[in-house]
Structures are given as C-alpha cells and as structure tokens.
C-alpha cells in the first residue's frame, strides 16, 4: 500500500473508535429506555385494571348497603323498654 494512504487511515481509525463506542453506548441506552417503557406500560395497564376492579367492588358494596338500608327502613318501628335485672 501507498504510505500516504496508510497515513490517512491512521487518524480516521483513531477518530472512529470513540465514535463507534459512543454509538454503541447510545444504542444500549435506547434499548433500555424502550424496554423499560414497555415494562412500565404493562405495569400501568395492570394498575388500571386493578383500579377498575376496585371501583366495581365499591359500587357493589354501595348497592348492597343501600338495599340493607332500605330493608331496615321498611321494617316496622318497634320500641323496646330496658328490662330491670334483679339480683
């Protein structure tokens, strides 16, 4: 090879090594971000599902309490007198 071409390649190779290292680091960082977001999206969806289930449970319990309250109000009112306990 021509010594002039070799002399030209040496600085190019010297500058390419850090550029390749930076690009590899950037690619790894982006992979972590992309995969991290997917994991977070799955976790977010699980939390939304749990909130939905809790809301359904609260609605069911509110309806049950309302029906119990209605049933108690429909009972005839009775008065009780305290009994004296003799010793």
Image (tube, helix red, strand yellow):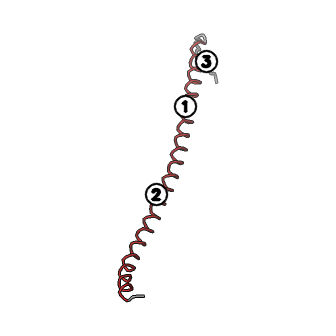
Q: Give the crowd class for mark 2: few <14, some 14-19, many >=20 residues within 10 Å.
A: few
Asked whether, in this view, residue 18 is left or right of residue 70, the answer is left
Q: Which numbered disc flags the more N-terminal residue, 2 or 1?
A: 2
Q: Give the crowd class for mark 3: few <14, some 14-19, many >=20 residues within 10 Å.
A: few
Q: Which picture quadrant has residue 60?
A: top right
Asked whether, in this view, residue 60 is left or right of residue 6, the answer is right
Going 63% across and 21% down the picture, which residue do you hit? 86
The mark lying in front, picked from 3 and 1, is 1
Going 57% across and 28% down the picture, which residue do you hit? 61
The residue that disc 3 covers is 83
Q: Which numbered disc flags the more N-terminal residue, 3 or 2?
A: 2
SS at mark 1 in the image: helix
The residue that disc 1 covers is 58
Q: Which numbered disc flags the more N-terminal residue, 3 or 1?
A: 1
Spot occupied by residue 6 in the image (x, y as percentages of width and height): 39, 86
The mark lying in front, picked from 3 and 2, is 2
Going 59% across and 21% down the picture, which residue do you hit? 68
3 and 2 marks in contact (CB < 8 Å): no
| Mark number displayed over residue 1 | none
Spot occupied by residue 85 in the image (x, y as percentages of width and height): 62, 21
Q: Give the crowd class for mark 1: few <14, some 14-19, many >=20 residues within 10 Å.
A: few
Q: How many numbered marks are there?
A: 3
Asked whether, in this view, residue 21 is left or right of residue 73, the answer is left
Foreground residue among 29 and 84: 29
Going 39% across and 75% down the picture, which residue do you hit? 16
SS at mark 2 in the image: helix
Foreground residue among 20 and 29: 20
Residue 39 vertical position relative to residue 86 in the rendered view, above or below: below
Asked whether, in this view, residue 41 is left or right of residue 18, the answer is right
The residue that disc 2 covers is 33
Marks 3/2: CA–CA distance: 74 Å
Spot occupied by residue 62 in the image (x, y as percentages of width and height): 55, 26
């Amino acid at each position: 090879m021509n010594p002039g071409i070799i002399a030209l390649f040496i600085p190019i190779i010297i500058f390419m090594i850090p550029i390749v290292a930076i690009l590899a680091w950037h690619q790894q960082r982006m992979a972590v971000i992309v995969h991290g977001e997917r994991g977070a999206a799955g976790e977010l969806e699980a939390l939304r599902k749990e909130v939905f289930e809790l809301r359904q449970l609260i609605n069911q319990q509110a309806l049950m309490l309302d029906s119990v309250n209605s049933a108690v109000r429909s009972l005839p009112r009775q008065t009780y007198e305290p009994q004296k306990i003799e010793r």
